[in-house]
Image (cartoon, helix red, strand yellow):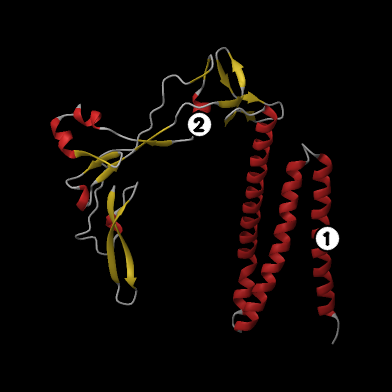
Amino acid sequence: MLDSTGKLVESILETYKYEKVWSPKLINSGSFKQASGHENPQTKPVTNETWTAKSVTLGGFTLPDALIDKMDKTESYAADEKAVSNAAPDVQNWFKLRQGGYYLGENPATAAIGDARVTFKVVRPAAVSIVARQVANTFEAYQAKAGGSILLLTYGTVSPDAMFKTAEKANKNLTWVFRAVGFLLMFIGLFLIFNPMAVVADVVPIFGSLLRVGVAAFVGLVASALSLVTISVAWLTYRPLLGLALLVLAAASMWGLLRLSIQKQELQKRPA
């Protein structure tokens, strides 16, 4: 739908520029600095809708919704005059066929705030391969003994081994993303705990900056060691040897940090 959006042009004079943009979501004009004269509609004339065929089949089997949702290859569907011609007269005056879709507004050449464009996308029938548990004439997720469920769908004719390898690769990538996010959150949390020391040292700016760098390095090492502990505990059930190896590495890292701390304290206690 066509809405207006505002952005600051000159921060000193607080001059704002408002321009028309096509947006799939409503833009709240109440948050504009100068809302008067730039009001956007509060509702959409046509809401987003998704329709699913009542029966989607693969050979003699009916696919469940969980597998149908995995068929996500869409393509544009060109609208025609048929739907408009069957509509009520007032609707025909409001809907106009334009560029494969419908335009809601007075004049597509001079779009106004509140006008809308309606387009369609469809999922065409295609050959797919699935990995699932057969139940009568349909399928359901296979519950693995180790926990979790398996329900895979891939476009084209693909062997089960290839599908498992693709799924395994995707899971590994997602796992590393979670690990990186976990490390980052741990680093931020620890840094917020130790950062007050650097804030106190900001009385002399250069000391505060140097201490903050030291705190970041220390926190990075601690966060790495704690992340290794978390990962190793998760691996103990499925790969005990790998889990134990990671625990030993984490313990060695923590011991090294402790030794450095003790040595630093001993040096500070020695007479000059």
Which mark is nearer the camera, 2 or 1? 2
Q: Secondary structure at mark 2?
A: loop
Q: Position of residue 75 (x, y in %)?
A: 42, 36
Query: On the rendered image, what quadrant is the C terminus found in?
Result: bottom right
How far separated are the C-alphas under marks 2 and 1? 51 Å
- Identify the residue at horizontal 29%, vertical 68% (top origin): 16
* Residue 264 as seen in the image, left or right of residue 150: right
Q: Quadrant of residue 121?
A: top left
Q: Quadrant of residue 87?
A: top left
- Identify the residue at horizontal 20%, vertical 61% (top origin): 36
| Label 1 environment density (alpha carbons within 10 Å; few <14, some 14–19, many ≥20) | few
- Identify the residue at horizontal 44%, vertical 19% (top origin): 55
- Identify the residue at horizontal 83%, vertical 57% (top origin): 252
Residue that protrudes farthest toward the top in the picture = 136
Q: Which residue is mark 2?
A: 71
Residue 132 appearing in the image: yes
Residue that protrudes farthest toward the bottom in the picture = 272
Q: Secondary structure at mark 1?
A: helix
Is 76 above or below relative to 226?
Answer: above
Q: Position of residue 107 (x, y in %)?
A: 18, 47
Earlier along the polypeptide chain: callout 2 or callout 1?
2
**Residue kind at label 1, given as amino acid type:** Trp
Tell me if label 2 and label 1 are in contact, CB under 8 Å.
no
* Residue 58 as seen in the image, left or right of residue 24: right
**Residue kind at label 2, given as amino acid type:** Met
Q: Position of residue 133 (x, y in %)?
A: 62, 20
Is 268 above or below relative to 103?
Answer: below
Q: Position of residue 8 (x, y in %)?
A: 33, 68
Q: Which residue is mark 1?
A: 255
| Label 2 environment density (alpha carbons within 10 Å; few <14, some 14–19, many ≥20) | some
